Image (tube, rainbow, N blue to C red):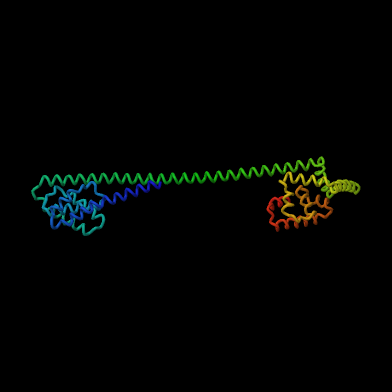
Amino acid sequence: MKHLFYIISLLLLCACGYTSRPSYALDEAQALMTDDPRQAYEKLNALDVSTLGDSATIARWALLYSEALAANNLYAPSDSILKIALSYYSRHDCPLELRRAESLKQSIGRLSSSVPDPLIEARYIQKEKEYYLYVERTKREQAILIALIIITLTVAVILWQRQRLKLRESQNELLMAEASGLKEQVRLHNADASELQRKLHELLDTRFSLIDSLCTTFYESQGTKNERKAVADKVKAEIEAVKSDPLIFADMQKAVNSCRDNLLDKLKADYTDIKPEEYQLAVYLACGLSSRAISLLLGESVDNVYKRKSRLKLRLKAMQCPHLAEFMEIF
Protein backbone atom coordinates (compact mmCIF):
# COMPACT_ATOMS: atom_id res chain seq x y z
CA MET A 1 0.00 0.00 0.00
CA LYS A 2 2.81 2.39 0.91
CA HIS A 3 4.66 1.62 -2.35
CA LEU A 4 1.52 2.39 -4.34
CA PHE A 5 1.33 5.89 -2.84
CA TYR A 6 5.02 6.42 -3.63
CA ILE A 7 4.45 5.50 -7.30
CA ILE A 8 1.47 7.87 -7.59
CA SER A 9 3.47 10.72 -6.04
CA LEU A 10 6.37 10.07 -8.44
CA LEU A 11 4.03 10.15 -11.43
CA LEU A 12 2.54 13.45 -10.27
CA LEU A 13 6.00 14.98 -9.86
CA CYS A 14 7.01 13.82 -13.32
CA ALA A 15 3.79 15.27 -14.74
CA CYS A 16 4.48 18.63 -13.08
CA GLY A 17 8.00 18.68 -14.52
CA TYR A 18 6.71 17.83 -17.96
CA THR A 19 4.03 20.52 -18.04
CA SER A 20 6.54 23.19 -17.04
CA ARG A 21 8.31 22.91 -20.44
CA PRO A 22 5.25 23.88 -22.58
CA SER A 23 4.56 26.77 -20.17
CA TYR A 24 8.08 28.05 -20.79
CA ALA A 25 7.55 27.83 -24.55
CA LEU A 26 4.30 29.79 -24.22
CA ASP A 27 6.11 32.48 -22.23
CA GLU A 28 8.68 32.81 -25.03
CA ALA A 29 5.99 33.03 -27.68
CA GLN A 30 4.10 35.69 -25.73
CA ALA A 31 7.31 37.72 -25.33
CA LEU A 32 7.92 37.56 -29.11
CA MET A 33 4.34 38.45 -30.02
CA THR A 34 5.01 42.20 -30.34
CA ASP A 35 8.53 42.27 -31.86
CA ASP A 36 8.48 39.11 -33.96
CA PRO A 37 4.93 37.72 -34.35
CA ARG A 38 6.07 35.35 -37.11
CA GLN A 39 8.60 33.72 -34.79
CA ALA A 40 5.94 33.56 -32.06
CA TYR A 41 3.60 31.80 -34.51
CA GLU A 42 6.30 29.26 -35.41
CA LYS A 43 6.98 28.50 -31.76
CA LEU A 44 3.29 28.05 -31.05
CA ASN A 45 2.86 25.91 -34.12
CA ALA A 46 5.83 23.74 -33.09
CA LEU A 47 4.11 22.74 -29.85
CA ASP A 48 2.31 19.40 -29.89
CA VAL A 49 -1.06 20.33 -28.41
CA SER A 50 -1.92 16.69 -27.64
CA THR A 51 0.93 16.56 -25.10
CA LEU A 52 -0.03 19.69 -23.11
CA GLY A 53 -0.74 19.04 -19.49
CA ASP A 54 -4.00 20.75 -18.56
CA SER A 55 -6.95 22.75 -19.90
CA ALA A 56 -5.53 26.07 -18.63
CA THR A 57 -2.37 25.58 -20.72
CA ILE A 58 -4.50 24.54 -23.69
CA ALA A 59 -6.64 27.69 -23.35
CA ARG A 60 -3.56 29.91 -23.12
CA TRP A 61 -2.04 28.27 -26.19
CA ALA A 62 -5.32 28.65 -28.11
CA LEU A 63 -5.47 32.38 -27.26
CA LEU A 64 -1.82 33.00 -28.18
CA TYR A 65 -2.14 30.95 -31.36
CA SER A 66 -5.18 32.96 -32.42
CA GLU A 67 -3.33 36.21 -31.59
CA ALA A 68 -0.35 35.04 -33.69
CA LEU A 69 -2.62 34.36 -36.65
CA ALA A 70 -4.18 37.80 -36.34
CA ALA A 71 -0.81 39.52 -35.85
CA ASN A 72 0.55 37.87 -39.03
CA ASN A 73 -2.69 38.44 -41.01
CA LEU A 74 -2.97 34.69 -41.60
CA TYR A 75 -6.24 33.16 -42.72
CA ALA A 76 -7.86 30.66 -40.34
CA PRO A 77 -10.31 28.24 -41.91
CA SER A 78 -12.45 28.33 -38.74
CA ASP A 79 -12.56 29.79 -35.23
CA SER A 80 -12.57 26.38 -33.46
CA ILE A 81 -9.21 27.03 -31.74
CA LEU A 82 -10.32 30.45 -30.50
CA LYS A 83 -13.53 28.88 -29.18
CA ILE A 84 -11.37 26.72 -26.91
CA ALA A 85 -10.06 29.87 -25.21
CA LEU A 86 -13.48 31.55 -25.16
CA SER A 87 -15.09 28.50 -23.57
CA TYR A 88 -12.43 28.11 -20.89
CA TYR A 89 -12.16 31.77 -19.87
CA SER A 90 -15.92 32.27 -19.76
CA ARG A 91 -16.28 29.24 -17.47
CA HIS A 92 -13.39 30.17 -15.18
CA ASP A 93 -14.16 33.87 -14.73
CA CYS A 94 -11.05 35.34 -16.39
CA PRO A 95 -12.27 38.74 -17.65
CA LEU A 96 -8.97 40.00 -19.14
CA GLU A 97 -8.32 36.89 -21.20
CA LEU A 98 -12.01 36.71 -22.15
CA ARG A 99 -11.94 40.27 -23.55
CA ARG A 100 -8.78 39.43 -25.53
CA ALA A 101 -10.47 36.36 -26.99
CA GLU A 102 -13.65 38.25 -27.89
CA SER A 103 -11.59 40.98 -29.57
CA LEU A 104 -9.71 38.35 -31.55
CA LYS A 105 -12.97 36.82 -32.70
CA GLN A 106 -13.90 40.10 -34.39
CA SER A 107 -10.41 40.40 -35.91
CA ILE A 108 -10.52 36.88 -37.32
CA GLY A 109 -13.92 37.65 -38.81
CA ARG A 110 -12.40 40.60 -40.68
CA LEU A 111 -9.58 38.34 -41.94
CA SER A 112 -12.01 35.92 -43.54
CA SER A 113 -11.64 37.80 -46.82
CA SER A 114 -7.88 37.14 -46.87
CA VAL A 115 -6.38 34.80 -49.45
CA PRO A 116 -6.28 31.24 -48.03
CA ASP A 117 -2.86 29.68 -47.57
CA PRO A 118 -2.93 25.86 -47.96
CA LEU A 119 0.07 25.46 -45.65
CA ILE A 120 -1.50 27.62 -42.93
CA GLU A 121 -4.80 25.75 -43.31
CA ALA A 122 -3.04 22.39 -43.06
CA ARG A 123 -1.22 23.52 -39.93
CA TYR A 124 -4.47 24.81 -38.44
CA ILE A 125 -6.28 21.54 -39.16
CA GLN A 126 -3.31 19.65 -37.66
CA LYS A 127 -3.64 21.67 -34.44
CA GLU A 128 -7.36 20.91 -34.32
CA LYS A 129 -6.55 17.20 -34.58
CA GLU A 130 -3.93 17.52 -31.86
CA TYR A 131 -6.51 19.22 -29.65
CA TYR A 132 -8.99 16.36 -30.17
CA LEU A 133 -6.19 13.94 -29.35
CA TYR A 134 -5.61 15.91 -26.14
CA VAL A 135 -9.32 15.65 -25.29
CA GLU A 136 -9.27 11.89 -25.82
CA ARG A 137 -6.06 11.55 -23.81
CA THR A 138 -7.54 13.60 -20.97
CA LYS A 139 -10.62 11.40 -20.90
CA ARG A 140 -8.44 8.30 -20.78
CA GLU A 141 -6.29 9.79 -18.01
CA GLN A 142 -9.40 10.74 -16.03
CA ALA A 143 -10.78 7.23 -16.45
CA ILE A 144 -7.42 5.77 -15.38
CA LEU A 145 -7.26 8.14 -12.41
CA ILE A 146 -10.79 7.22 -11.34
CA ALA A 147 -9.97 3.53 -11.74
CA LEU A 148 -6.75 4.02 -9.77
CA ILE A 149 -8.63 5.80 -6.98
CA ILE A 150 -11.23 3.03 -6.93
CA ILE A 151 -8.52 0.36 -6.86
CA THR A 152 -6.65 2.21 -4.12
CA LEU A 153 -9.81 2.56 -2.03
CA THR A 154 -10.69 -1.06 -2.68
CA VAL A 155 -7.24 -2.23 -1.62
CA ALA A 156 -7.40 0.01 1.45
CA VAL A 157 -10.81 -1.39 2.41
CA ILE A 158 -9.59 -4.96 1.84
CA LEU A 159 -6.49 -4.37 3.96
CA TRP A 160 -8.60 -2.70 6.65
CA GLN A 161 -11.05 -5.58 6.66
CA ARG A 162 -8.18 -8.10 6.79
CA GLN A 163 -6.69 -6.21 9.72
CA ARG A 164 -10.05 -6.24 11.47
CA LEU A 165 -10.42 -9.97 10.82
CA LYS A 166 -6.92 -10.63 12.16
CA LEU A 167 -7.67 -8.56 15.25
CA ARG A 168 -10.97 -10.36 15.74
CA GLU A 169 -9.30 -13.74 15.25
CA SER A 170 -6.64 -12.86 17.82
CA GLN A 171 -9.35 -11.71 20.24
CA ASN A 172 -11.31 -14.92 19.63
CA GLU A 173 -8.17 -16.98 20.19
CA LEU A 174 -7.49 -15.10 23.41
CA LEU A 175 -11.07 -15.64 24.58
CA MET A 176 -10.88 -19.32 23.65
CA ALA A 177 -7.62 -19.64 25.58
CA GLU A 178 -9.17 -17.93 28.60
CA ALA A 179 -12.27 -20.11 28.34
CA SER A 180 -10.09 -23.21 28.06
CA GLY A 181 -8.09 -22.11 31.11
CA LEU A 182 -11.25 -21.47 33.11
CA LYS A 183 -12.64 -24.80 32.02
CA GLU A 184 -9.47 -26.52 33.17
CA GLN A 185 -9.58 -24.69 36.50
CA VAL A 186 -13.20 -25.73 37.01
CA ARG A 187 -12.30 -29.31 36.13
CA LEU A 188 -9.39 -29.34 38.57
CA HIS A 189 -11.50 -27.71 41.27
CA ASN A 190 -14.25 -30.27 40.76
CA ALA A 191 -11.69 -33.04 40.78
CA ASP A 192 -10.18 -31.74 44.01
CA ALA A 193 -13.59 -31.43 45.60
CA SER A 194 -14.53 -34.94 44.50
CA GLU A 195 -11.25 -36.32 45.76
CA LEU A 196 -11.67 -34.53 49.10
CA GLN A 197 -15.16 -35.85 49.44
CA ARG A 198 -13.99 -39.37 48.59
CA LYS A 199 -11.16 -39.29 51.10
CA LEU A 200 -13.36 -37.85 53.81
CA HIS A 201 -15.97 -40.54 53.24
CA GLU A 202 -13.32 -43.20 53.24
CA LEU A 203 -11.97 -41.89 56.54
CA LEU A 204 -12.78 -44.45 59.27
CA ASP A 205 -15.27 -46.22 56.97
CA THR A 206 -17.47 -43.11 56.52
CA ARG A 207 -17.33 -42.40 60.27
CA PHE A 208 -16.37 -38.82 59.52
CA SER A 209 -19.61 -38.13 57.67
CA LEU A 210 -21.53 -39.96 60.35
CA ILE A 211 -20.14 -37.65 63.03
CA ASP A 212 -21.22 -34.54 61.12
CA SER A 213 -24.69 -36.03 60.68
CA LEU A 214 -24.96 -37.00 64.35
CA CYS A 215 -23.90 -33.52 65.44
CA THR A 216 -26.78 -32.08 63.43
CA THR A 217 -29.13 -34.72 64.81
CA PHE A 218 -28.14 -33.72 68.33
CA TYR A 219 -29.71 -30.29 67.78
CA GLU A 220 -32.67 -31.37 65.69
CA SER A 221 -33.77 -34.70 67.21
CA GLN A 222 -37.44 -35.10 68.17
CA GLY A 223 -39.20 -37.43 70.59
CA THR A 224 -39.14 -38.32 74.29
CA LYS A 225 -36.49 -37.31 76.71
CA ASN A 226 -35.13 -40.85 76.78
CA GLU A 227 -34.85 -40.88 72.99
CA ARG A 228 -33.15 -37.51 73.02
CA LYS A 229 -30.81 -38.69 75.76
CA ALA A 230 -29.98 -41.87 73.83
CA VAL A 231 -29.20 -39.88 70.68
CA ALA A 232 -27.20 -37.37 72.67
CA ASP A 233 -25.19 -40.10 74.38
CA LYS A 234 -24.44 -41.72 71.04
CA VAL A 235 -23.40 -38.43 69.50
CA LYS A 236 -21.23 -37.56 72.46
CA ALA A 237 -19.51 -40.92 72.29
CA GLU A 238 -18.72 -40.44 68.59
CA ILE A 239 -17.55 -36.88 69.14
CA GLU A 240 -15.33 -37.85 72.05
CA ALA A 241 -13.80 -40.63 69.96
CA VAL A 242 -12.90 -38.09 67.24
CA LYS A 243 -11.65 -35.49 69.72
CA SER A 244 -9.50 -37.96 71.60
CA ASP A 245 -8.02 -39.85 68.63
CA PRO A 246 -4.96 -37.99 67.20
CA LEU A 247 -4.84 -40.34 64.22
CA ILE A 248 -8.20 -39.07 63.00
CA PHE A 249 -6.98 -35.45 63.12
CA ALA A 250 -3.79 -36.46 61.30
CA ASP A 251 -5.87 -38.17 58.62
CA MET A 252 -7.93 -35.01 58.28
CA GLN A 253 -4.76 -32.97 57.65
CA LYS A 254 -3.50 -35.46 55.06
CA ALA A 255 -6.85 -35.43 53.26
CA VAL A 256 -6.93 -31.63 53.13
CA ASN A 257 -3.32 -31.30 51.91
CA SER A 258 -3.86 -34.01 49.31
CA CYS A 259 -7.06 -32.55 47.91
CA ARG A 260 -6.39 -28.82 48.36
CA ASP A 261 -2.84 -28.55 46.98
CA ASN A 262 -1.07 -28.63 50.38
CA LEU A 263 -3.30 -25.90 51.75
CA LEU A 264 -2.42 -26.53 55.40
CA ASP A 265 1.32 -26.54 54.67
CA LYS A 266 0.92 -23.18 52.92
CA LEU A 267 -1.03 -21.87 55.89
CA LYS A 268 1.78 -22.81 58.30
CA ALA A 269 4.39 -21.25 55.98
CA ASP A 270 2.49 -17.97 55.53
CA TYR A 271 1.18 -17.68 59.08
CA THR A 272 4.15 -18.84 61.16
CA ASP A 273 2.65 -17.53 64.42
CA ILE A 274 -0.61 -19.39 64.03
CA LYS A 275 -1.93 -20.71 67.34
CA PRO A 276 -2.77 -24.43 67.74
CA GLU A 277 -6.46 -23.69 68.31
CA GLU A 278 -6.52 -21.51 65.17
CA TYR A 279 -4.85 -24.26 63.17
CA GLN A 280 -7.34 -26.83 64.49
CA LEU A 281 -10.21 -24.56 63.44
CA ALA A 282 -8.67 -24.13 59.99
CA VAL A 283 -8.40 -27.92 59.57
CA TYR A 284 -12.08 -28.41 60.45
CA LEU A 285 -13.10 -25.61 58.08
CA ALA A 286 -10.99 -27.06 55.27
CA CYS A 287 -12.72 -30.42 55.81
CA GLY A 288 -16.05 -28.72 55.15
CA LEU A 289 -17.55 -29.29 58.59
CA SER A 290 -20.46 -27.09 59.65
CA SER A 291 -20.17 -24.54 62.45
CA ARG A 292 -22.37 -26.75 64.66
CA ALA A 293 -20.15 -29.76 64.13
CA ILE A 294 -17.04 -27.69 64.83
CA SER A 295 -18.58 -26.29 68.03
CA LEU A 296 -19.08 -29.81 69.36
CA LEU A 297 -15.58 -30.94 68.34
CA LEU A 298 -14.04 -27.89 70.01
CA GLY A 299 -16.39 -27.94 73.01
CA GLU A 300 -17.51 -24.37 72.43
CA SER A 301 -20.75 -22.62 71.55
CA VAL A 302 -21.75 -21.98 67.95
CA ASP A 303 -21.49 -18.22 68.54
CA ASN A 304 -17.89 -18.62 69.69
CA VAL A 305 -17.10 -20.66 66.58
CA TYR A 306 -18.49 -17.88 64.37
CA LYS A 307 -16.45 -15.30 66.26
CA ARG A 308 -13.27 -17.36 66.02
CA LYS A 309 -13.86 -17.86 62.30
CA SER A 310 -14.26 -14.09 61.82
CA ARG A 311 -11.10 -13.32 63.80
CA LEU A 312 -9.05 -15.87 61.86
CA LYS A 313 -10.38 -14.53 58.58
CA LEU A 314 -9.51 -10.92 59.51
CA ARG A 315 -5.98 -11.90 60.61
CA LEU A 316 -5.32 -13.66 57.32
CA LYS A 317 -6.63 -10.71 55.32
CA ALA A 318 -4.52 -8.26 57.33
CA MET A 319 -1.37 -10.29 56.65
CA GLN A 320 -1.89 -10.18 52.86
CA CYS A 321 -0.57 -13.73 52.50
CA PRO A 322 0.62 -14.97 49.08
CA HIS A 323 -2.03 -17.70 49.17
CA LEU A 324 -4.80 -15.55 50.67
CA ALA A 325 -7.28 -16.39 47.92
CA GLU A 326 -6.91 -20.14 48.63
CA PHE A 327 -7.32 -19.58 52.39
CA MET A 328 -10.52 -17.56 51.86
CA GLU A 329 -12.14 -20.51 50.07
CA ILE A 330 -12.44 -22.50 53.31
CA PHE A 331 -14.60 -19.87 55.06
Outermost residue toward the bottom in this view: 96
Left or right: 244 as drawn, with respect to 193: right
- Residue 66 appears at what percent x and percent y? 16, 52
- Of 159 and 254, nearer the camera is 254
Furthest-left residue in this view: 115
In the drawing, does residue 225 fall left or right of residue 322? right
The count of marks equals: 0
Nearest to the observer: residue 147 or residue 39 = 39
Horizontally, is 160 left or right of 296 in the view? left
Residue at 68% of width from left, 56% of height from top? Answer: 320
Q: Is 148 left or right of 177, judged from the image as shown?
A: left
Identify the residue at horizontal 33%, vertical 46% (top origin): 145
Q: Is residue 309 above or below residue 195?
A: below
Estimate the x, y position of residue 185 in percent, counting from the top left.
Answer: 65, 44
**Extreme residue in the right direction:** 226
Q: x and y percent of residue 280 in the render? A: 79, 51
Give the x, y percent position of residue 286.
75, 49
Q: In the picture shown, does residue 137 fall above or below 99? A: above
Image point (48%, 46%), residue name: 164
Quarter of the figure with residue 34:
bottom left
